[in-house]
Amino acid sequence: MRTPVVLSLVGIAFLGLPVLAPAYYVTLMLPFMAYGVVLLGLNLLFGYTGLVSFGHALFIGIGAYTGAVLTTHLGVRHMELILPAAALAAAVVAAPVGALCVRYVKIYFGMLTLAFGMVFYTFLLKFYKLTGGDEGMRMLRPYLLGSEWPGFSKTAYLIGPYYYFSLAVLVLATLLMWRIVRSPFGLCLKTIRDNPLKAESLGVSVPRYRWYAFMISAVYAGAGGALLATPTGNVDPTLAYWTHSGNIVFMVLLGGFSSFFGPLLGAFAFIFLQDTVMSVFPYWRLIFGAVLAFIVIFAPGGLMGLFARGRRPVEVSRA
Amino acid sequence: MLAVQEIDVFIHASHILRRVSLEVREREVVCLVGRNGAGKTTTLRTIMGYHRPRGGGIRFNDVPLHERRTHEIARLGLGFAPEESGIFPDLTVAENIEISTWTRPGGRPAAERLAAAYEIFPVLKQYGARKGPEMSGGERKMLSIARALALDPDMLLLDEPFEGLSPAIVPTVAAGLNEITQRGHAILIAESNIYHVPDFATRLYVIERGEIIFAGRPDDVRKDAAALRAIGGHA
């Protein structure tokens, strides 16, 4: 009963934000929405299938570099083409990488994804001619709905058309993911997370379903990566670095992986918390480390778990 | 229908099953009786593909099972209800039963299969939207059997369906199993308590220390002193 009310209020706030809030805060919403798309996918793997990837920045990197290569080298400027291309590129890489990784679980899966992420990071860094090395590449302002929006300054473009475009992508990605987790496929993923051996005896092909989940999460990360590149205007190898993978796992934990909207809340909290802490205290990672420790020990359900407390207990595995 | 032929199974270095053979024919209810640790669960888990026999073979409707993976074996029509029930806590009772209709589509329509499963244990209907952890042990057993049944299997493998149940609920489960056999499914039951062997069981195997020491009709086991000693029954 409460959820539709909260969602409509959030929706109205999002629509009105560019008009009401200072431009600075509106620009902070852009990475939030890009990460939102990434995290919806990551949580299909993490929260729903029970696999923690420490290399998912690999796919953010692929999506972002796809956008940069398309806009600067190939003259493709339409965001409506860039997003599917980024998603496709991520899927092409995720197919073999995922097929290898899903044969392992727990720490082995995490380490293997980390290794693949670092391989790609090194590739970006060392193949200077192709990728621009540590300087990266420019991501030119993409066309939205077929228009370059010529009358808009960079900021006006970002907090106007690009904001609403990102919002539309996030909403579509959310609706699609909602359908996925509620489908028989999504429920089979939960059975794999809860008890893979038992799921198999009911006819669930565990490695295949894990692979599907991996592919879907990579596609989401690719699209999110392309979305993330525009506000920065530049892509560089740190997008694929392992600390970036760590950050998105942190966002999921912060928001709460056992809830559908938890990761979105986590992305939001992470970005605004980072902005606030960085402005008053240079050692923001120190604060974030403490926050992470606090969450794992006292609020394993994340922020969403705190809000939902009393409604549904969050079950924590210490195993 | 199911033929286990002289399988040898090792778990790590331990020789758990020694040349175990057993057979389940169409519409039969076969009980595999033995003490805890005798090898009942290992036998069922080997049939389901969790363990690979080092020697011998398993055939189900003339398909060699010992080369297949677990989910393929399930889709061939073997419904497995393990000892610990294996209810998925995050799924509702209805979803727990529905899984089987998604993983093995084809054959009879899903609605018909679900109706058949609920008909055996009508009590489950009232739990529809509840989640697994809110159920009692007996209800979980029933849910586990109903879920295996919704797979529309030719044969059910039930590991200790009566274990840990209150005496009041044992007849309910037994009646459900009887009803299942009336519909033409074969059943292989692993059971540690001879007194739980239902009277509609057609044949009985006694397993002790990984070996089959008796095979025959349930009435005949009472004449076999060694078998009777192994399962702790009174003559």
Image (tube, coloured by chain):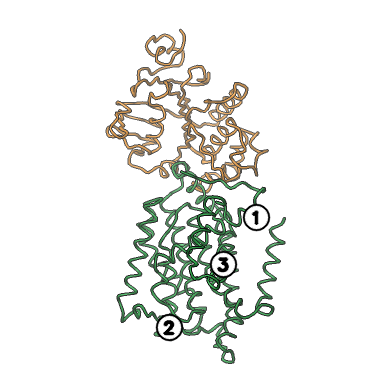
Chain colours: A green, B orange
Judged left or right of residue A8, residue A317 is left
The amino acid beneath tag 2 is: Arg
Residues B31 and B153: in front is B31
Measured as percent of width and height from the top left, residue A46 is found at 48, 55
Examine the image and state in which quarter residue A266 appears: bottom right
Other residues around mark 3 within 10 Å, as few (<14) / some (14–19) / many (≥20): some
Other residues around mark 2 within 10 Å, as few (<14) / some (14–19) / many (≥20): many
Residue tagged 3: A273
Q: Which of the two marks, 2 or 3, is nearer to us in this view?
A: 3
Q: Secondary structure at mark 3?
A: helix
Q: Which of the two marks, 1 or 3, is nearer to us in this view?
A: 3
Residue tagged 1: A307
Tell me which residue sits at (56%, 67%) in the image: A273
Examine the image and state in which quarter residue A93 appears: bottom left
Q: CA distance from mark 1 to mark 2?
A: 41 Å
Q: Earlier in the sequence, mark 1 or mark 2?
A: 2
Measured as percent of width and height from the top left, residue B174 is found at 57, 24
On the question of residue B109 being in view, the answer is no
Q: Quadrant of the N terminus of chain B?
A: top left
Examine the image and state in which quarter residue A127 appears: bottom left
Q: Secondary structure at mark 1?
A: helix
The amino acid beneath tag 1 is: Phe
Other residues around mark 1 within 10 Å, as few (<14) / some (14–19) / many (≥20): few
